[in-house]
Image: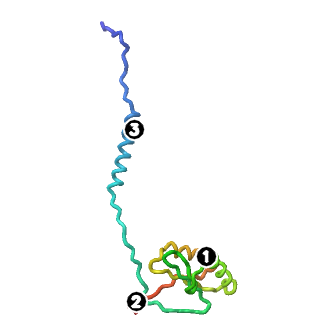
Amino acid sequence: MKLRSPLRRRRTRLEIIPLIDIMFFLLASFMMVSLQMQKVRTLKASLPTATLAAAAAKPDMVKLTVDRNGQVALDSKAVSFPDLLALLTNRYSLNTNLPVYITGARDATHGSVMYVLDFVKRAGIRRVAIAVKAAPGRS
């Protein structure tokens, strides 16, 4: 004969939700630790200098120079961007085959030179080049 307990018998349950929370916590912590362990290594970029550069000055050529602050000079005269746009569009309307050479100072940022390049393209000019100078002492 079986005796029954007056207390109701409960089935044991395995709660999964706290286990899922713990697993997500462990996953996140391992991801954070693995990101901390990664060493960030950067390379110092030293772009090569031109060894053979010949000066090819023509009267209808536009030479733009970008200094370290991002300011533009047209034939060694400082020009603001609105004046530069007006000047470039006027010269382009006279000669649609107008070449433009952009020279950046040694300490000019790549972004400022690309901004000027985009500015020249916005004026409608398609013949644009980056001018280079030969390194001193090399020939």
| Mark 1: secondary structure | helix
Q: Residue at x 60, y 75 (%)?
A: 119
Three-letter amino acid code at the position of disc 2? Pro
Real-space Cα separation, disc 3 to disc 1, in angstroms: 57 Å
Q: Earlier in the sequence, mark 2 or mark 3?
A: 3
Q: Earlier in the sequence, mark 2 or mark 1?
A: 1
Marks 2/1 in contact by CB < 8 Å: the verdict is no
The residue lying furthest to the front in this view is 78
Q: Residue at x 64, y 86 (%)?
A: 97
> Within the image, what quadrant is residue 39 found in?
bottom left
Three-letter amino acid code at the position of disc 3? Asp
Q: Which mark is residue 136?
A: 2
In the image, is residue 41 above or below residue 8? below
Within-10-Å neighbours for mark 1: few <14, some 14–19, many 20+: some
Q: Badge 3 is on which residue?
A: 21
**In the rendering, at what x and y percent does residue 65 appear?**
53, 82
Q: Badge 1 is on which residue?
A: 81
Q: Residue at x 65, y 82 (%)?
A: 87
**In the rendering, at what x and y percent does residue 116 appear?**
56, 76
